[in-house]
Structure formats: structure tokens, C-alpha cells
Image (tube, rainbow, N blue to C red):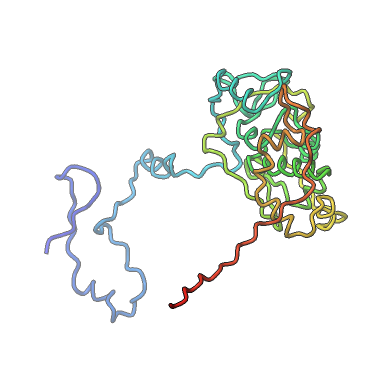
């Protein structure tokens, strides 16, 4: 039986051969050996193994993992890619989301980043407009942002849609959403990157997720409302003990928690353009004042399932 060739790199003439293992050596590590279960001694060359190189350059290359396998830095900010918003797209956004003419907007340059807006401006993502954000921002949204000590651009789609949806719902019930009520209904939390989302244990709030390219669709708006420009650290504030679920049910004029669960399950209907206009969160030029429209006075009941009726049997003649 021939020897085992060395598998390392090099010309064929440099392949080293080793003598075959003796039967006595193999038997020493067989099933009947007292050393059974322990690892055999190191053999210089085994089939399929690659010996480590002694070259320092090769050792450094083997120690450094490729870029695709490197773990991302969890504390790093989300990608600061160039904005895909153009001048034509900005005009479409003005018309579609009824941005007033006195609100100054600007299209980012190729070198601009979402995390570094120009002086006197704030960053606004297009997905925030789809989540119900309108200009000027409602006073209660500004109050919530200042209490959280975060900027407008830190709100993810879910946090913005839930907050704007609840503001519209409270307005429709002739109530005002304050931060304490929002804290009782759920919790605004931030991830490792500083983005803010919304979580709730007792309310099933379903929201639509934005597209994957949402982070590159942004523009700048002049900060006329004293909002935080730079990203801030999310301030944690616990749920207030003096606010109970019964208080929210009474404010929203619903009979019980089941009706409230039904109302907030589909918050997307409260951030639709017509509903935002109805409660005065969106302003349409040439249309009547939204405050003159009739508010919803009764909560629609959940649709009841129609009972199944057994088919009638035909009488035999």
C-alpha cells in the first residue's frame, strides 16, 4: 500500500510521501483499545485536511473573514444613500399629499445624506407622508416628538401611522391624544440604529409595511416648528398609572374594550386622505373647511356573521 500524498500547494515534484500506517498502530485506536473514545494523535497529513501555512501574509488573510461574512455593526446608522427624490417627484408629492405652498421643501443633492440635513431643515421620508404625516405637523405630534426627544425622521412607518391614526381617531371622537394616552395604548421604542417603532400588548394595531427602498426616498423641509434636527436618543417613559383603559374607552365613547379593539385593528382607514381632511389634519385648497363636516357620532359595530340557513327539502308529490 502506497503512502498518503501531502495535499498542500506546490509542484508535483515537491509532494512529500509518508510511510503507510502499521496494522499495530491502527489496532491501538480500534474499538478494543483502552484509548477508544479519545482522539488519535495528530498525523501530519490526513485525507481532505489542509495544513495551516506558515506565511504571515497568508495567516492574516485566513484570519480576516470576507466582507460578506463580517457581522454588521448593530450600532451603525442606517444607510445614508443618496436620495432618489427628483424635482418632478417633489411636485407630485406636493399635489398628492397637499403640501401647502408656504411649506418650503428642497430636493437633496447627490452628496446630501438623510442623517445630515442642511442648516434650518429637517429630513422627511416619503413613507412618512404615506403613513399620514401632513404639513404643518399637528401640534400633538410635535408634542410627542419633543417628549420622546427624537427627530421626525427617526419615526418608522409603523410609529408614524399609529401615531397619526390615533390622533385622527381621537379628533373624530372629539378628544385629544396626549402622550399619556399614547403610552397607555402602547409604547414607542427605538432599535439599535435609533429608529422608532410602536409596540402594543393589548391592542392589535395592523399597519402596512413600506417598500424596501423607502430609506432612499427622502427630501428636506424647512424647520418652522422647532423640531429636533439631529437624531436623539429615545427617552423611555413608562405607562402612566393614573390613566386606565376605562378612561380611554370613556374618552372615545365606545361601550367596551371589544369595540376599541375593533376600531384600532385597522388604523389605515384613519390615515386615508379623506379622513385626514375630515378631522382637519389635511388642508385642501378650494374645499370647505374640514371642521364644518359632520364628525362620526357612533362607532360602527363589527360585522356579524350571517347564520347559515338549511336548504328546504322539496315535498314529494
Q: Is residue 85 left or right of residue 12?
A: right
**Among all residues in the image, which is located at the extreme bottom?**
32
Q: Which residue is more in the foreground, 295 or 219?
A: 295
154 or 198: nearer the eye?
Answer: 198
Question: Residue 90: percent from the left, percent from the top?
Answer: 59, 21
In the rendered view, tell whether residue 311 sits above or below residue 191: below
Q: Is residue 217 left or right of residue 313?
A: right
Image quarter of the N terminus: bottom left
Q: Quadrant of the C terminus?
A: bottom left
The quadrant holding residue 235 is: top right
**Is residue 169 depicted above or below 101 in this figure?**
below
Viewer can see residue 178: no
Dividing the picture into quadrants, the one containing residue 250 is bottom right
Residue 310 position, x and y percent, is 53, 71
Observer-nearest of 187 and 52: 187
**Image point 30% across, 79% down: which residue?**
33
Q: Residue at coordinates 77% horizontally, 44% vertically from top-left?
A: 296
Rendering coords of residue 146 (x, y %): 79, 36
Residue 58 falls left or right of residue 285: left
Q: Is residue 57 above or below residue 284?
A: below
Amino acid at each position: 500500500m502506497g503512502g498518503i500524498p501531502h495535499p498542500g500547494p506546490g509542484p508535483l515534484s515537491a509532494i512529500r510521501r509518508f510511510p503507510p500506517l502499521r496494522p499495530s498502530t491502527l489496532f491501538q485506536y480500534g474499538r478494543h483499545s483502552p484509548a477508544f473514545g479519545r482522539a488519535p494523535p495528530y498525523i501530519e497529513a490526513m485525507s481532505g485536511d489542509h495544513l495551516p501555512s506558515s506565511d504571515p501574509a497568508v495567516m492574516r488573510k485566513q484570519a480576516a473573514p470576507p466582507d460578506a461574512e463580517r457581522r454588521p455593526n448593530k450600532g451603525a446608522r442606517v444607510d445614508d444613500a443618496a436620495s432618489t427624490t427628483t424635482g418632478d417627484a417633489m411636485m407630485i408629492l406636493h399635489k398628492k399629499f397637499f403640501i401647502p405652498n408656504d411649506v418650503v421643501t428642497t430636493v437633496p443633492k447627490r452628496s446630501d445624506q438623510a442623517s445630515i440635513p442642511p442648516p434650518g431643515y429637517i429630513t422627511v421620508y416619503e413613507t412618512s407622508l404615506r403613513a399620514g404625516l401632513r404639513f404643518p405637523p399637528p401640534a400633538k405630534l410635535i408634542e410627542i416628538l419633543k417628549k420622546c426627544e427624537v427627530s421626525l425622521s427617526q419615526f418608522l412607518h409603523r410609529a408614524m401611522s399609529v401615531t397619526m391614526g390615533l390622533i385622527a381617531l381621537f379628533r373624530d371622537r372629539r378628544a385629544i391624544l396626549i402622550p399619556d394616552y399614547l403610552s397607555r395604548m402602547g409604547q414607542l421604542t427605538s432599535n439599535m440604529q435609533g429608529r422608532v417603532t410602536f409596540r402594543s400588548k393589548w391592542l392589535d394595531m395592523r399597519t402596512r409595511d413600506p417598500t424596501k427602498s423607502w430609506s432612499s426616498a427622502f427630501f428636506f423641509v424647512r424647520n418652522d416648528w422647532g423640531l429636533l434636527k439631529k437624531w436623539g436618543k429615545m427617552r423611555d417613559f413608562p405607562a402612566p398609572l393614573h390613566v386606565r383603559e376605562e378612561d380611554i374607552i370613556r374618552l372615545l365613547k365606545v361601550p367596551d374594550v371589544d369595540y376599541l379593539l375593533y376600531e384600532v385593528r385597522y388604523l389605515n382607514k384613519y390615515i386615508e386622505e379623506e379622513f385626514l381632511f375630515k378631522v382637519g389634519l389635511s388642508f385642501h385648497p378650494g374645499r370647505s373647511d374640514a371642521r364644518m363636516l359632520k364628525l362620526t357620532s357612533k362607532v360602527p359595530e363589527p360585522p356579524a356573521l350571517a347564520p347559515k340557513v338549511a336548504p328546504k327539502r322539496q315535498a314529494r308529490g
